[in-house]
């Protein structure tokens, strides 16, 4: 192996040759094995330091079964809320003796297969925290079955047996819809994210429960589907408007889609909040900068990442870990829901 300057990297056998020792003895001394006498270990460490020996992390992992490295697997770095989760994970791990290795599966199944084939068999990581993308659950289940500690962030998918940290998604959907009802809104639509994610199923259930509490009928034609992107929020809002149904409010399952929904309403000549009140979910920094500023359900994203990292380090140490930690959401009221709607005839309220 060459260094960046073109020189060959110093190897254990180079130290062994210079000291007249066996490679095995030098390796055991560098790894702190107890079957090497203290004087030999001291001499080996002195020579290694003088020669500038830098141990290979992968070789060390293979020799002792521990890399002191934790993995974080995320679908994509383009998700706006992902950076806060990563920051929480990184801050918790920085205060420990572990290092952090970040993986993405933006390339789909091929990325997943590469991760499975490279990271785990080589013992590059001691544990894995992840935001599970659809289609990855079986891969992760196989890793856990082989003994890799796993903690899921946000969505437990088809394998609720994994320890997980999430937010109170159902309560968040309930609070968002109750807020709209409290303002006199009665024709409340919802733009939901991919139903493969349990968080979206929970947010939809919160919406339905709030309607039922208020004696409002659930109308499946008032529920549109998006994929978390702003463009899908535009398309979903356009489809609701083009269907010709009366709408005076919309609860959107994430802020990105809410931004798109507000744009579509503007282009359709609908004023937010006078004609249509809008509530999002996440509380991204951009939510407060929208015109009007977006009412939204805040997820404690940083705390989710930090909690997941703490749980993972405990699991790696063999300590018991809670199956599910749910952190509370919070409704943040801004101008996108200010004021009250014009009265809707009872017949239109379903």
Image: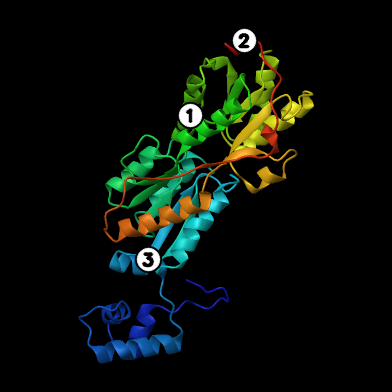
**In the rendered image, is residue 89 in sight?**
yes
Q: Quadrant of the C terminus?
A: top right
Vertical comparison of 69 with 245: above or below: below
CA distance for labels 1 and 2? 23 Å
Query: Which of the 4 image quarters holds residue 122?
Result: bottom left
Residue 206 numbered tag: 1
Residue underneath mark 2 = 346
Q: Is residue 178 left or right of residue 159?
A: right
Query: Which of the 4 image quarters holds residue 255?
Result: top right
Q: Nearer the viewer, residue 18 or 90?
A: 90
Q: Earlier in the sequence, mark 1 or mark 3?
A: 3
Mark 3 crowd level (few <14, some 14–19, many ≥20, 10 Å Cα): some
Q: Is residue 98 left or right of residue 4?
A: left
Residue underneath mark 3 = 68
Residue 56 position, x and y percent, is: 41, 71
Mark 1 vs mark 2, foreground winner is: 2
CA distance for labels 1 and 3? 41 Å
Mark 1 vs mark 3, foreground winner is: 1
Vertical comparison of 112 with 187: above or below: below
Residue 322 position, x and y percent, is: 31, 49
Q: Nearer the viewer, residue 49 or 85?
A: 85
Vertical comparison of 213 with 252: above or below: above
Residue, x 51% and y 44% (percent of image)? 75
Vertical comparison of 245 with 4: above or below: above
Q: How is the image coloured?
A: rainbow
Q: Name the outermost residue toward the left.
A: 35
Q: Earlier in the sequence, mark 3 or mark 2?
A: 3
Q: Nearer the viewer, residue 296 or 82?
A: 296
């Amino acid at each position: 192996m060459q260094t960046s300057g073109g020189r060959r990297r110093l190897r254990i056998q180079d130290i062994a040759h210079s000291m007249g020792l066996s490679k095995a003895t030098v390796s055991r001394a560098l790894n702190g094995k107890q079957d090497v006498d203290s004087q030999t270990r001291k001499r080996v460490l002195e020579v290694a330091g003088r020669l500038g020996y830098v141990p290979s992390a992968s070789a060390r992992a293979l020799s002792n079964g521990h890399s002191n490295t934790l993995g974080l697997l995320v679908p994509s770095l383009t998700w706006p809320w992902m950076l806060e989760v990563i920051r929480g994970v990184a801050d918790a791990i920085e205060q420990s003796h572990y290092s952090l290795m970040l993986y993405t599966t933006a390339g789909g199944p091929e990325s997943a297969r590469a991760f499975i084939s490279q990271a785990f068999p080589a013992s590059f990581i001691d544990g894995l925290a992840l935001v599970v993308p659809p289609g990855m659950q079986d891969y992760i289940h196989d890793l856990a079955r082989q003994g890799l500690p796993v903690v899921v962030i946000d969505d437990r998918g088809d394998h609720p047996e994994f320890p997980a940290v999430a937010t109170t998604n159902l309560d968040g959907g309930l609070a968002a819809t109750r807020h709209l009802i409290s303002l006199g809104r009665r024709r409340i639509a919802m733009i939901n994210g991919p139903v493969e994610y349990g968080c979206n199923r929970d947010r939809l259930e919160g919406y339905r429960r709030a309607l039922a509490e208020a004696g409002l009928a659930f109308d499946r034609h008032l529920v549109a589907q998006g994929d978390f992107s702003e463009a899908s929020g535009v398309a979903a809002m356009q489809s609701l408007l083009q269907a010709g149904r009366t709408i005076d409010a919309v609860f959107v399952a994430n802020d990105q889609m809410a931004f798109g929904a507000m744009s579509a309403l503007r282009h359709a000549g609908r004023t937010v909040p006078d004609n249509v009140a809008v509530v999002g979910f996440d509380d991204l920094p951009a939510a407060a900068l929208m015109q009007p500023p977006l009412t939204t359900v805040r997820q404690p994203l940083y705390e989710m990442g930090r909690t997941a990292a703490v749980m993972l380090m405990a699991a790696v140490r063999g300590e018991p870990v809670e199956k599910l930690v749910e952190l509370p959401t919070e409704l943040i009221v801004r101008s996108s829901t200010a004021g009250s709607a014009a009265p809707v005839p009872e017949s239109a309220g379903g």
